[in-house]
Image: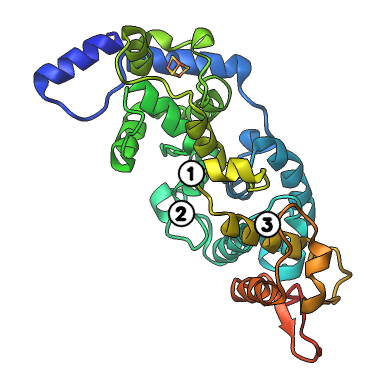
Amino acid sequence: MRASDVRAESAIAGATAPRIAGLAEVQRALLAWHRRHGMGAPWRTSRDPYHALVAAVMAQQTQMARVLPAYERFLAAFPTAEALAGATTADVIRAWSGMGYNQRALRLRAAARIVVVDGWPREMEALSTIDGIGPFTAAVVASFAFGRPAACIDTNVRRVLGRLAGEERITPAALRRLAGEALVVRKPARWNQALMDYGARICTPRPKCDACVVAEWCASRASKTRGTKDELPSDGRRVAEERATYEIDTTPKRMQQRRRVPADDAARRYYRGRTIDLLRGLAPGGCIDVDALPPLLGGRHPKPSLRQMRAIVASLVRDGLAVLRPEAVPPAVSLPED
Ligand code: SF4
């Protein structure tokens, strides 16, 4: 059944739930594409849930090219969940070097501490009750490591499924339903990987429809060729929106405005990251005067004032990423060596 037939049938039936035309053919075509063009990564062939957990947490908000070397480094430092669970905060933050969004490292350790004591749940629902494991990570661990029928939903998967069903602004609830219906339950890991890779390489924010192996079943493509208002997204605003989910915010101010990220927030986030980078570079136990930080930070944003710098440090302390040294006058900051 073609995409246009599904639309017509849905209109007649008054149905509103998004569907994918020719689902069995789409599944076959995407799995075949993945066999030839899928991205190789060490955690994809591993059945160790810890490997899947580390990779899934790293992959959130970070491009895969940066995840690969960081994953190897992190596993060299903490080869098992037990090793990570017993690590100090400072060592975990040091091993997270180059990844940004450092709180993810602490959430990862929090999850490791729980599974080391309670064991690994195998189902997505149980995994997602663990502190530090969200639905996407839970689905990755359940499907990659345990072969459970759990659908991974990230920005790429949302884009591919939404377009195939002709619902690019699909609601989260409808997307969850659609992803569950589309899941190849015999091969959940391969199917999840196929969708993620397809969204990263072919059905990108600017889709390569001419090279698409499922174009004949794609409702968005059908709409486009009919010239309806359901245009394929190709404008810069949408591209920036998609990239924002994956990238750490180090782009020029012009791009930040297109993403509608307030410049102050972008600067604050940037200087939080730079402060942690500086602390990471110190010898264990080392600290830096808070008031000496602004000229050391560099970067393209205006330098923070002393008051702003102290607020940035206070936010890092609140998040457990840094500690103030009470003995130091003036105040000094370091990584938590606990
Ligand atoms: S035809 Fe284009 S929009 Fe549709 S799934 Fe293929 S690449 Fe994506």
- Give the residue displayed 51% in from the left and 36% down from the top: 242
- Residue 127 image label: 2
Dot 2 and dot 1 residues touching (CB under 8 Å): yes
Left or right, 78 with respect to 169, comes to right
Question: In front of the other: label 3 or label 1?
Answer: 3
- Give the residue displayed 77% in from the left and 65% down from the top: 91
x and y, in percent, of residue 117 in the image = 56, 67
Dot 3 and dot 2 residues touching (CB under 8 Å): no
The secondary element bearing badge 2 is classed as: helix
- Give the residue displayed 63% in from the left and 49% down from the top: 54
Choose top left, top right, bottom left or bottom right for residue 93.
Answer: bottom right
Residue under pointer 1: 142
Residue under pointer 3: 270
Q: CA distance from mark 3 to mark 2?
A: 32 Å
Name which of mark 2 and mark 1 comes first in the sequence: 2
Residue type at mark 3: give it.
Answer: Tyr
Q: CA distance from mark 2 to mark 1?
A: 8 Å
The secondary element bearing badge 1 is classed as: helix
The secondary element bearing badge 3 is classed as: helix
Q: Nearer the viewer, residue 287 or 148?
A: 287
Query: Badge 1: few (under 14), some or many (20 or more) residues near its Cα, within 10 Å?
Result: many
Query: Badge 2: few (under 14), some or many (20 or more) residues near its Cα, within 10 Å?
Result: many
- Residue 161 image label: none
Q: Nearer the viewer, residue 76 or 47?
A: 76
Residue type at mark 2: give it.
Answer: Leu
**Residue 55 seen from this side:** no
